[in-house]
Structure formats: structure tokens, C-alpha cells
Image: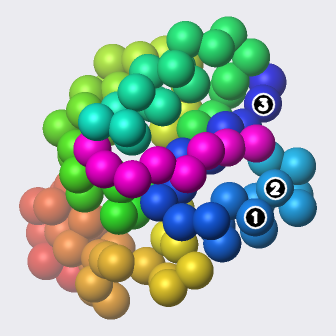
Amino acid sequence: MKMFLISDNIDTKAGLRLAGVNGVVVHGREEALKALESAMKNKETGIILITELLVELFPEVISEIKLKAARPLVVEIPDRHGTRRSSDYIMRYVNEAIGIKV
């Protein structure tokens, strides 16, 4: 199984390319959706890495894949500017999951 990157910038692609991960740089929702569809059709792709900025363009599609698709695993990653999530992201996630404020 291989990893594939869908990125919104060249720096992220270059960094992961050094680690042996192939990928594409896309600009815009439609181009990103086409790249995602193409990566999902490839039987050798086991993990799709996608930058958080691109996930913000179509969160419903990513959620649907995560919930229903057996393969590939879709992982949201920060780009070179860091994460776009708030500092209390994990705590809010836990609170929503268990229904108790920790």
C-alpha cells in the first residue's frame, strides 16, 4: 500500500516527496475533488494525505469517505504554516464524543 498527498502548496509536496510520498498540488475545490477521486480509484493507494485547507473546501465529502469507505484511510495534515485547528480542538472533540465536559 502506498500513500498519496493532495496539497494546496508546493512546500508540503516537496517535504513529503523527500519521505517518498507522491502527490499533487491543486488549486480550488473542483481540482481537489478530481485528485481525490483519482487517488481513491488507484488500488495501490492505502492512505491519502490531504491538507487541512483543502478539507475545509469540502468537509462533507471527507466525512462521507471516512465513515463509509473501507479503503483508503484519509488523513488531514497541516501545511507548512501549521494547523488551522484551535488550540482546544482535542478537548472539544472529547467533550462532544462522551458528552461530558472534562
Residue 59 vertical position relative to residue 68 in the rendered view, above or below = below
Which numbered disc, 2 or 3, marks the residue that appears first in the sequence? 3
Q: Does any portion of residue 29 appear in the rendered image? A: yes
Pointer 1 local density, CA inside 10 Å: few below 14, some 14–19, many at least 20: some
99 left or right, relative to 3: left
The residue lying toward the viewer, choosing from 54 and 49, is: 54
As measured in the structure, the alpha-carbon distance from the residue carrying label 2 to the one carrying label 3 is 13 Å
Q: Position of residue 13 (x, y in %)?
A: 68, 59
- Disc 3 secondary structure class: strand
Do the numbered discs 1 and 2 sit on residues whose CB atoms are within 8 Å? Answer: yes
In the rendered view, how is the structure colored? Answer: rainbow
Which residue in the structure is indicated by mark 2? 17
Pointer 2 local density, CA inside 10 Å: few below 14, some 14–19, many at least 20: some
Q: Which mark is residue 63?
A: none
| Amino acid of disc 2 | Arg
Do the numbered discs 2 and 3 sit on residues whose CB atoms are within 8 Å? Answer: no
Which numbered disc, 3 or 1, marks the residue that appears first in the sequence? 3
Q: Nearer the viewer, mark 3 or mark 1?
A: 1
- In the image, which residues are magenta? 22-29
As measured in the structure, the alpha-carbon distance from the residue carrying label 1 to the one carrying label 2 is 5 Å
56 left or right, relative to 68: left
Which residue in the structure is indicated by mark 1? 14
Q: Position of residue 4 (x, y in %)?
A: 67, 38
102 left or right, relative to 9: left
